[in-house]
Amino acid sequence: SSVSKQTYAQRAAQHPNPAAKALLETIERKRTNLSVSVDVTKQEDFFRIIDTVGPYVCLLKTHVDIIEDFEPSVIERLKELSQKHDFLIFEDRKFADIGNTVALQYSAGVHKIASWSHITNAHPVPGPSIISGLKSVGLPLGRGLLLLAEMSTKGSLATGVYTEEAVRMARANRDFVIGFIAQRRMDGVGLREGESTPDEDLLILTPGVGLDTRGDGMGQQYRTPREVIVESGCDVIIVGRGIYGKDNGANVEAVRAQAERYRAEGWKAYRERVDI
Ligand code: 5FU
């Protein structure tokens, strides 16, 4: 049956990439398809939010380069919280350069992303060489890559033929590319006459999710978990400000309540989709 009708457990059992398999297993074990994006600039806020939302997420999304008081111990603490709460880590780095440069950006510098981030992502704009570059670093470490096939923003240029080519690039690299940042399921997108992909399972992780507003006045567009999971067939909802609010998550109980709420909405939508 089509991937979107299968359970996360069924998909985990079949997935060839270790990071994708671990993500699907975590989703099933914790009964959550929620990823929280922790976009705050101070360590203190960052770790308070993570320790609060940890029990409710399968995947914790970071922009590690926005942390002002970054030091190497941030990574050690992030790894400890990932163990404590049983979630994977996704550094939303959006690589976009030539293969040689992205391999250096991924492995080296201050952040050494490949050494701790189970999943990262890249813009397909340079073509397939961006995958080769990142793969040379990430594949031996068992990492997974998402391609940005679409974006949530108003006026995004990632549409049409660009999106189709992104899907073809992923299909040609299924050992390392585990899916997409996108707004809808990509099964069948970009297939040429006579092509079929019966055993393909490319995950869809979807930002631009909010229950209380439709946008942020800076181009972001929000849809509900049900629109994303049921109507568009996506696998993971990514929520930032909808969970930690406008005050960097100062109110711990409010953050916990929102994380529980989005987890429940995302899981209910999944059960509706697969009919369980
Ligand atoms: F690729 C994308 C995209 O298309 N839209 C996004 O919003 C990534 N994002 C990220 O998801 C963005 O960089 C933020 O980290 C997060 C959304 O945060 P929000 O507070 O839920 O709007």
Image: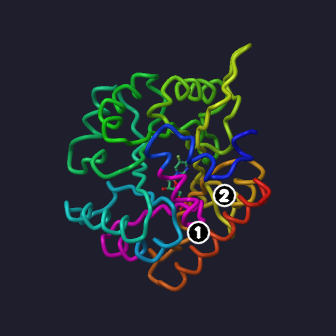
Q: Is residue 174 magenta?
A: no
Residue 109 in picture, x, y percent from top left: 21, 44
Residue underneath mark 1: 242
Residue 107 in picture, x, y percent from top left: 25, 40
Disc 1 on helix, strand or loop? Answer: helix
Residue beneath the point at 58% across and 36% down: 149
Residue underneath mark 2: 222
Disc 2 on helix, strand or loop? Answer: loop
Question: In the picture provided, is 31 more to the left or to the right than 147?
Answer: right
Residue 100 in picture, x, y percent from top left: 28, 26
Q: Does the magenta stretch include residue 26?
A: yes
Residue 265 in picture, x, y percent from top left: 69, 68
Above or below 70: residue 146: above
Q: Disc 2 to disc 1, how far (Cα)?
A: 10 Å
Q: Is the Cβ of the residue at disc 2 closer than 8 Å to that at disc 1?
A: yes
Q: What is the residue that sits farthest to the top in this orientation?
A: 193
Quadrant holding the C terminus? bottom right
**Mark 1 residue type:** Gly
**Mark 2 residue type:** Tyr
- CB of mark 1 near ligand 1 (< 8 Å): yes
**Residue situated in front as seen by the camera: 8 or 103:** 8
- Quarter location, residue 183: top right
**Residue situated in front as seen by the camera: 19 or 57:** 19
- CB of mark 2 near ligand 1 (< 8 Å): yes
